Image: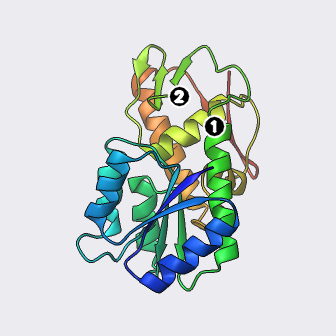
Amino acid sequence: MKQILIVEDDIVIAETIGYALEKNSFAVANVSTGEGALSHLQNNKMDLVLLDIGLPDMNGFEVLKSIRQTSEIPVIFITARDDEIDKVLGLELGADDYVTKPLSPRELVARVNANLKRVTQSSVPASKPLSLFDINEKYMQITFDGTELSLTKAEYNLLAYLIHRPKQVFSRDQLLTAIWNESYLADERTIDTHIKSLRAKLKVVNSGQETIKTHRGLGYSLSM
């Protein structure tokens, strides 16, 4: 049974979420503060965290930063804040999804299932990685042409996805859906930004090797 940690100081919302998850065969633990969440994660094995941004002792972004120092557990933000800047910040800090209040318990359960499924799938490569790349799935590290790359979580997920699927062309929308959740961040320019950053980092290692190709009007692929 999958273990879900709910970090929410609103008792009614926490109970509503917990009830929906338990009805769908999840085990649930509830805490109401950021410190409580970090303590619980340190002492218990959890499979996913539902994290409110507006906590009484520290905001959810700070909690996520602390979590990401030691763990890659899936984290879904639950918040009343729907500003794009918050979504971008959450993404860059390593959040896996972002759900705004008032939320649908049914939708939330679907997102929990989708994130847990993605974690399971990401541990199994779709095909053999390219010879120029070496991926350490456990530590989320990628080596290119013998040099370890310094990547954000988003950059790692995007590059690993392309490496496992060489020569396949993916649209920006396909990459957004595959790497993050649908509706997490609707702006497809996010993919362009990460591609640009990855190209720069790859070029520093090997300026003569064209790795990520742009297919005009179609999307991106990773060349051999």
Q: Is 35 on the left or on the right of 150, as rendered?
A: left
Q: Does the rendering let one see residue 73? A: yes
Amino acid carrying label 2: it is Glu
- Nearest the camera: 15 or 78? 15
* Residue at position x 58%, y 34% in the image: 160
- Whole-number angstrom distance, CA of label 2 to CA of label 1: 8 Å
Which residue extends farthest left? 57
Name the residue that disc number 1 marks.
122
Query: Decide: marks 2, 1 in contact (CB < 8 A)?
Result: yes
Quarter of the rendering containing residue 188: bottom right
Q: Does the rendering let one see residue 176? A: no
Q: The residue tagged with tag 1: helix, strand or loop?
A: helix
- Nearest the camera: 7 or 98? 7
Quarter of the rendering containing residue 34: bottom left
Q: Is 199 on the left or on the right of 53, as rendered?
A: right
Q: Give above or below for 209 relative to 10.
A: above
- Nearest the camera: 65 or 211? 65
